[in-house]
Image (cartoon, rainbow, N blue to C red):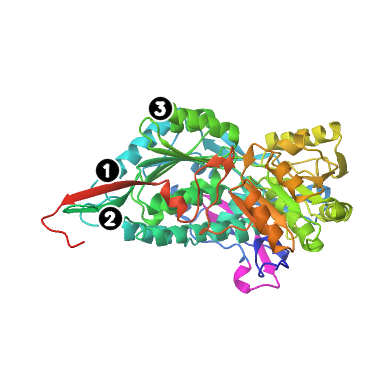
Amino acid sequence: MTPQGPKPGHFGMLGPRRALEEGRHSGLGLTVTLTVTFTQSWESDKIPPPLTTPVSPACRRTACYQGNQGQELTPSPLAEWAFQLGGPQGWALNLMPHHSERLIQIFINNEWHDAVSRKTFPTVNPSTGEVICQVAEGDKEDVDKAVKAARDAFQWGSPWRPRQQAGASDRGRLLNRLADPDSRTYLAALETLDNGKPYVISYLVDLDMVLKCLRYYAGWADKYHGKTIPIDGDFFSYTRHEPVGVCGQIIPWNFPLLMQAWKLGPALATGNVVVMKVAEQTPLTALYVANLIKEAGFPPGVVNIIPGFGPTAGAAIASHQDVDKVAFTGSTEVGHLIQIAAGSSNLKRVTLELGGKSPNIIMSDADMNWAVEQAHFALFFNQGQCCCAGSRTFVQEDVYAEFVERSVARAKSRVVGNPFDSQTEQGPQVDKTQFQKVLGYIKSGKEEGAKLLCGGGAAADRGYFIQPTVFGDVQDGMTIAKEEIFGPVMQILKFKTIEEVIGRANNSKYGLAAAVFTKDLDKANYLSQALQAGTVWVNCYDVFGAQSPFGGYKMSGNGRELGEYGLQAYTEVKTVTIKVPQKNS
């Protein structure tokens, strides 16, 4: 079975060449003065357009309505910074006064509010370590307000749940509106500013998958329904799929836009209302999407978005007596706390997509060029900040030396730098905490005897950049082989037989994903059945579609997101049985 490469434009094969030009784009009271012109060998519809300037309804200051943009988010050339990163001169983005006020509020009932406590926290540009702006710090009191607004919106007879019509097709129409924003380039730029991932990834990968996810669930809105059931006697029996109610959703910082769509899509398609807590590291795009939700026409209270911290706002959602379901993506440790809080409060439904330590198995008959490139992508994509990263690379001993040599060469060639730069493959880690955590794991690997083959330190003296790092001679008992690093640190392990690697791959508390590279169809089928993981990729990695369910075994979580399976957690099944005079079945 010879692996086939993805079609042009597949996100695993990004290699764009782009030139920077000057331009403007504004939205949500921010202005990014940066235009990117892309030239590519693939289809034109896969080329991100230049950053443009649509009119933003976000800022409510009179001066802005009069056309005065005030002091805004503008670029400053930082030649020294770009030089330190080994790339061409780039741009850094710094927030000036005036529009920062627009960003600090909480979105409840289609309106913007300060936190009840009046507290704020900074969100930081990970490329520079500088504060972008202050954001309202929501906590229990704000969650209470949001839950009340959501509960009111969920009442039978409300605009969201009208008595005289089903409302399902209207929900699909609203989701399709949300999936067609005018501000796509700005959303991608804001994601890159706040998260640090390369702009080309934000646009071509994350945003593309966001829109596909929303459109997919828009199509389900009037198609997920019950069945008629033939039962004995003069009775007519059928089932209804009804919304669960108020859904708490807690999303992570590694894919802010994408995880927001994964949660909102199925919840809204099935008629639920949402109270969402966004990660404190990356709140900006979710707040921008809040405006788009209102503009699309969703009624007040249907979606409420609270920036804040896990121990306060997140805990309040998980333990709230009037929240009917909670969905969480994040660490296994926090997922455990959420499960406990849900059970000790009102037994709310819980779906969890948690951590992973996914095995990526390279058999000796694999296409070596393809396996090396895909294993590199499996680990280093998104700066290694991916729950399903192929973070344990098992290589059969016959090809181990060659694979290691090629993998090290590929890691050394990886371009780390300004995420808005045309050649950058890897941006910074999301924040200082994550940066230091990853460096701590690298230190642990060296101390425990793994062979550091390249990288191993910071990639710049500013921002949170880490060198692409590869360890060889890694043993199963080492900390770096057991714990989720969530950074650009590749661990390569050697194995002899299929049975050996199955046992070692499954010897983990995690079971989120796995991959196999081989030309032998029998080996591929055997391994895909034997591996304890919610997703198994064969001769590919990180291939996602809105149609395919995703979730984990063991301590990688419970429940599934995406696909038809993703709708199940957001509906209650009601059985209705009617006594009839006569039945013809």
Q: Where are the magenta residues, as a range?
A: 26-47
Distance from disc 2 to disc 1, alpha carbons, whole Å, reads 29 Å
334 relative to 517, above or below: above
Foreground pick, 464 / 411: 411
Q: Which amino acid type is marked by label 1?
A: Gln
Q: Which residue is mark 3?
A: 345
Q: Which residue is mark 1?
A: 155
Foreground pick, 26 / 345: 345
The reply to whether residue 86 is in sight is: yes
Instruction: Pick whichever of labels 1 and 3 is earlier in the sequence.
Output: 1
Which element is circle 1 on? loop
Q: Which amino acid type is marked by label 2?
A: Ile
Q: Which amino acid type is marked by label 3?
A: Ser
Q: Which residue is mark 2?
A: 229
User: Which quadrant, please, contains the C terminus?
Assistant: bottom left
As drawn, the residue found furthest toward the left would be: 581
| Residue 345 found in image quarter | top left
Distance from disc 3 to disc 2, alpha carbons, whole Å, reads 35 Å
User: Which quadrant, please, contains the N terminus?
Assistant: bottom right
Image disc number at residue 74: none
- For image coordinates 16% across by 53% down, the residue present is 234
Could you tell me residue 388's position as x and y percent? 64, 47
Q: Tell me, yes or no, whether the highlighted magenta stretch contains residue 34.
A: yes
Label 1 packing within 10 angstroms: few (<14), some (14-19), many (20+): few
420 relative to 131, above or below: below
Could you tell me residue 159's position as x and y percent? 27, 51
Q: In this figure, what is the number of numbered marks?
A: 3
Q: Tell me, yes or no, whether the highlighted magenta stretch contains residue 425.
A: no
Label 3 packing within 10 angstroms: few (<14), some (14-19), many (20+): some
Task: Kindly check if marks 3 and 2 are in contact, taking CB atoms under 8 A apart as contact.
Answer: no
